[in-house]
Amino acid sequence: MLLTGAEEAGLRGAKNYAETHEKELKEIETVVIACDTMRDLKDMAVYDRDMSGTVKHDWGVKHLVQNAGKNCGYDLKFESIYIGACDAAAFTQRGIPATGFAAMDPTPPRYYHTRLDDVDMLCEDAIAAGIEIMIEAACMYDKDGLPTE
């Protein structure tokens, strides 16, 4: 698990980590699933494109998350981050297999990046579903690796 900072300031934390550790991330089989906002369960999705749709994430990683969702009873659609980016973009741009995963209203919602974005906005059901899916994805990856096209 990796927690990066400064996501809202140009992905600075993820970009710095991906650049600094690029060699070892490529030498040691690495997969990145960048978990973002877990708030709106009905909008839970796998981000297959990022940076306003210009960066295409790894086929195997996005299908790993989608299949893990199916195993947990969720029909995860592929979505694109239309405005902005998640930390997965920094890794994908460096050639490290990655995708994004979130449960956020894409409109964006009223609380997004405002003073209303506080602990009261947390949704236990969305967080629990996200954790369940990530555990399933880790177990699936450990057993079979990434799905292939």
Image (spheres, rainbow, N blue to C red):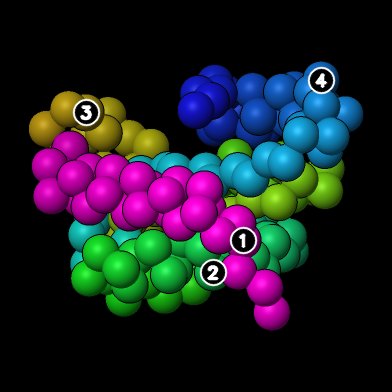
Local SS, label 4? helix
Is the Cβ of the residue at disc 2 closer than 8 Å to that at disc 1?
yes
Q: Which mark is residue 118?
A: 3
Residue 78 as seen in the image, left or right of residue 40:
right
Q: Left or right: where does residue 87 sit relative to residue 118? A: right
Amino acid type indicated by mark 2: His
Residue ID for mark 2 = 63
Q: Quadrant of residue 124?
A: top left
Q: Quickly name the residue at label 1.
A: 146
- For label 2, the crowd category at 10 Å Cα-Cα, with few meaning under 14, some 14 to 19 and many 20 or more, is many
Q: CA distance from mark 1 to mark 3?
A: 36 Å
Which numbered disc, 2 or 1, marks the residue closer to the eye?
1
- The alpha-carbon separation of the residues under discs 2 and 1 comes to 8 Å
Q: Are marks 1 and 4 in contact (CB under 8 Å)?
A: no
Counting from the top left corner in percent of width and height, residue 60 is at: 64, 65
For the point 42% across and 49% down, which residue is it? 139
The image position of residue 123, as x and y in percent, is 15, 44
Looking at the rendering, the stretch of residues picked out in magenta corresponds to 122-149
N-term mark: 1 or 4? 4
3D distance between C-alphas at marks 1 and 4: 25 Å
